Amino acid sequence: MADTPDYPALVLRRGEERRLRAGHLWVFSNEVDVARTPLTAFAPGQPVWIVDAAGKPLGTGYVNPSTLIAARLVDRAGHALDRSLVVHRLKVALALRERLYPEPWYRLVFGESDGLPGLTVERFGDVVVAQATTAGMDRLRDEVTAAILKVLSPAALMWKNDSGARAIEGLGESVELVHGRLDGPTVAREGGLDFLCDLREGQKTGWFYDQRANRDRLAPYVKGARVLDVFSYLGGWGLRAAGFGAAEVDCVDVSARAVDGIRANIARNGFGDRARAHAADAFEFLRSARAERRKWDVVILDPPAFVKRKKDFKEGSLAYRRLNELGMQVLERDGILVTCSCSHHMPREALVDGLQAGARHLDRQVQLLEPLSQSPDHPVHPAIPETDYLKGVIARVLPA
């Protein structure tokens, strides 16, 4: 066909195409027939045809010869990896978000789940932040930039390529404004509140949209309550609780920059009479609160990933259990504990098992009220378990 892209072939070993045919998008290095197509023959990020051992094309994608995930399938129909394809994928992703949200504050592209492996795109009103975490997507940066400008017409577009995942792909880190102007902090709007975000220096891509649907569910638990928000970052959980009528809110984060951000967001939303920010290590703050016999009606624990790799599971799962025990020890007798994990390698069952073990150790009983998972602007790809990473529970904690 005339429009078939002229890409070299990456040939898989016999039988190794099954997972791709079942829906997955990754090719591991040991699945490549290196006798026929040596990985060393490819440049990082180079577009390829991925074909099975019989030579039948599975689709177009890109390759990185120096990583465990040697290739990612992008288009099963075999279209070229270009601006036109990215525009189409952006429009499909946008159609979902516009059904979900009345305003443009959301994650627009969630990598593999939106058919653009290695790409994250977030909207902050008329400001867009993009991040490429793979060599293949980094190579497509100009095409992605052009596609975003065409589909969204933002006032500003920033590439925030400072993720640690880039080092695995042999990529450097950078933060670059490629379109428009960005003066000072940007606003993330959620639940009728405004949160000031530092897109250049802030964590990840500036805001944690993945927890929005879970924060929306706080309303029946926090009205009139004293709320503790640990690992608060910019106060998302705590100030949403204040917005739902919490009587008192304490937000804790170890980062002085984050605490300054929390205080700015407290002032911006008019919660100065009910909310406070504390710069402290989460575990030390909880231990001190326990020693001082301070109590809250609702405790929210939203830590960073304690289990970043499978080999970290034992140590990380113990950290989650210890954190939950400390959280339960500063709860009132009939209190609500919100606990989360963003570790893909920490199964939901393991999180709940640790919570139950901690409760029994403290002679408490736990009622699981609601399961928590990532917001729908972070859709799960059913063939790729790695896209289902966020889990948590809202639990009631009672004396045994």
Image (cartoon, grey):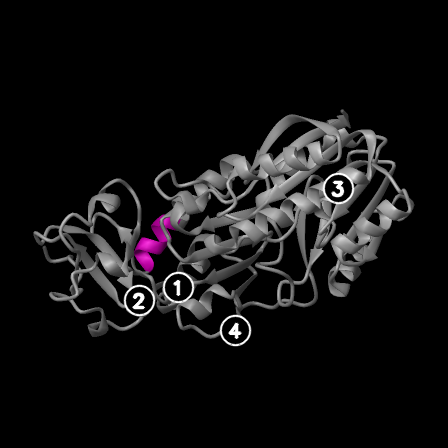
Residue ID for mark 2: 64
Q: Are marks 3 and 1 in contact (CB under 8 Å)?
A: no
From mark 4 to mark 3, how far is it between C-alphas? 37 Å
Q: Position of residue 112 (x, y in %)?
A: 38, 49
Q: CA distance from mark 4 to mark 2?
A: 20 Å
User: Which element type, helix, strand or loop, lies under badge 4?
Assistant: strand
Pick the residue in front: 88 or 331.
331
Question: Which residue was labeled with disc 4?
Answer: 174
In the rendered structure, which disc, 4 or 3, sits on the residue that comes first in sequence? 4
- Name the residue that disc number 1 marks: 134
Task: Verify CB contact (< 8 Å) between mark 1 and mark 4.
Answer: no
Q: Looking at numbered disc 1 in the image, what kind of residue is underneath it?
A: Thr
Q: Which residue: 26% across, 51% down?
A: 75
- On the image, the x and y values in percent for residue 40 come to 22, 73
In the picture, the quarter occupied by the C terminus is: top right
In terms of sequence position, does the residue under pointer 1 or pointer 4 come before the other? 1
Q: Nearer the viewer, mark 3 or mark 1?
A: 3
Q: Is residue 86 magenta?
A: yes
- Asked if the residue at tag 1 contacts the one at tag 2, i.e. Cβ–Cβ closer than 8 Å, the answer is yes
Q: Please tell me which residue is depicted at 51% across the width and 38% down the height of the picture.
A: 376
Mark 3 surroundings within 10 Å by alpha-carbon count, few (fewer than 14), some (14 through 19), many (20 or more): many
Quick one: label 3 or label 1, which is nearer the N terminus? Answer: 1
Q: Which residues are magenta?
A: 83-89
- Estimate how packed mark 2 is, as few (under 14), some (14 to 19) or many (20 or more) residues with alpha carbons within 10 Å: many
Label 1 element class: loop
